[in-house]
Amino acid sequence: MPMSETVEMLQAILGTIDEGIHVVDADGITIFYNHVASKLDGLTPDEVLGKPLLEVFPSLDRHSSTLLTVIAGGEPIYNKPQTYTNWRGVRVETVNTTLPVRVGRRLVGAVEVAKDIGKLKELSEKLMDLQAKISRPRKGKRSQKGNGDGLSFHFSDILTRNERMHQLIDRARRAARTSSPVLIYGETGTGKELFVQSIHQASARRSQPFIAQNCAALPATLLESLLFGTTKGSFTGADDRPGLFELADGGTLFLDELNSMPLDLQAKLLRALQDGEIRRIGSSHAVRVDVRVIAAVNEPPQRLVQSGAMRTDLYYRINVVSFELPPLRERREDVEMLTAHFLDKYNRRFQMQVGGISEEVAALFSRYDWPGNVRELEHVIEAAMNMVEAELIEKEHLPQHLLDRVSGLSSAVPGLARGAVNTSGTTATGERTLPDVLRRVEEQMIAEAMRETDGNILRAAKLLGIPRQTLQYKLSQLGGMNR
């Protein structure tokens, strides 16, 4: 292929990438500038190509420009925030990764990949300003008890008949008396934040701030500034802003999906836990904070440590008090109570008078495995309430995905398909009680999954939608199933 065609093909490929790409030669002259970079900067390629960088972006200089810094030093820069003003006066905020370009040993230029974080940064700063306004309640005024719709939950809001859940609640009440870090593991929808807020409300910190942050909701660079704050001048455009640690001083900071936090930021969190001090980005001054950190993950913590998603030292520091919330399929005795609760909730919200669910729906609920846990049950009830016109929720009012999954479960387990229960109340396999039937369902589903995966526990666990450790425990209880 001729060199000219190769260059054209490379330019076409770079032009299709959905991130800003800006390439300059060794003299800082732009030689490539794709349409995404053009959109970010508010400039046309003709206004940038062939021109010196500082002429087009006069707010930058040789020290603040990441491209020129890489050309001068020859070292790459990763994930660096940059705020600048183009020659039309438009303020641009990005996170840049900038790499030197070499031919042999000779540095011939630099390439920069830019991600637009302007809107995210604006939202995070608004969030921090809002948190600062609401994080200090008036002295002597305690939070009102939540009813399931508000932001404040207590242990009395956790509805359960499950003995294991009652034991967890008792342990959590005791843990609420201290300020030790807490790590909570539970699948999505098991009520981790409800549990966390209950600990806060039962503690001596109840009148102090409770701040929650999902670590997967923001890019790493924004998450760091949100947690620890910024110092004016720490990077171009930065202001003096307190982070969530400072805003939560005296109270509780809940970090959800902790395993989504980058490892280098986990190291900074570890230092904050060990020293009780934080440093704003760009500051050499330590700020003392009194914050109880509660973290949550939706995968088994030991698996996260083994896979490298969580630092081992952070795990042992934050896992002082730990809780594992059981999924709804392991507390089926709660389905009826929770169903009644959500019916009452949406009757009040929608001003309806639905009396309950039919026997057929109750049977479906008892067979369903609830992969989305309590949150899914609530959404199923809400969806059905939008469809029902009579006094009872019937099968036809349920979401199709639930019916399809229940049908799949029934066909996978002989003797549990519709019509397999005789008039004496026993199943075709001879069990008489619901626990017996459920145990038989579980055994056969596990056996089938192990057969389909040739005894591979990890693949079988994924097929069943349960953690590997849970499957290992169940297999040990069942004698290994000859795996």
Image: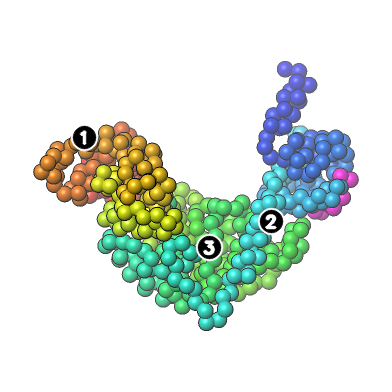
| Segment tinted magenta in the rendering | 55-64
Percent from the top left, x then y, of residue 470? 32, 49
Is 201 located above or below residue 328 in the figure?
A: below
Cα separation, mark 2 vs mark 1, equals 56 Å
Magenta: main secondary structure equals: loop
**Residue at 38 percent of width and 38 percent of height:** 400
Task: Spot the residue most to the bottom.
Answer: 140
Front residue of 409/472: it is 409
Q: Secondary structure at mark 1?
A: loop
User: Crowding near pointer 2: few (<14 within 10 Å), some, many (20+)?
Assistant: few
Front position in the image: 302 or 145: 145
Q: Amino acid at mark 2?
A: Glu
Q: Can the viewer see residue 236? A: yes
**Quadrant occupied by the N terminus:** top right
Residue bearing mark 2: 122
Q: Amino acid at mark 1?
A: Pro
Q: Residues within 10 Å of mark 3 (few under 14, many from 20)?
A: some
Q: Which residue is mark 3?
A: 212
Q: Is residue 259 magenta?
A: no
User: What residue did someone put label 1 on?
Assistant: 414
Which comes before the other along the chain, label 1 or label 3?
3
The reply to whether the C-beta atoms of the residues labelled 3 and 2 are less than 8 Å apart is no
Image coords of residue 160 (percent x, y)? 31, 61
Q: Secondary structure at mark 2?
A: helix
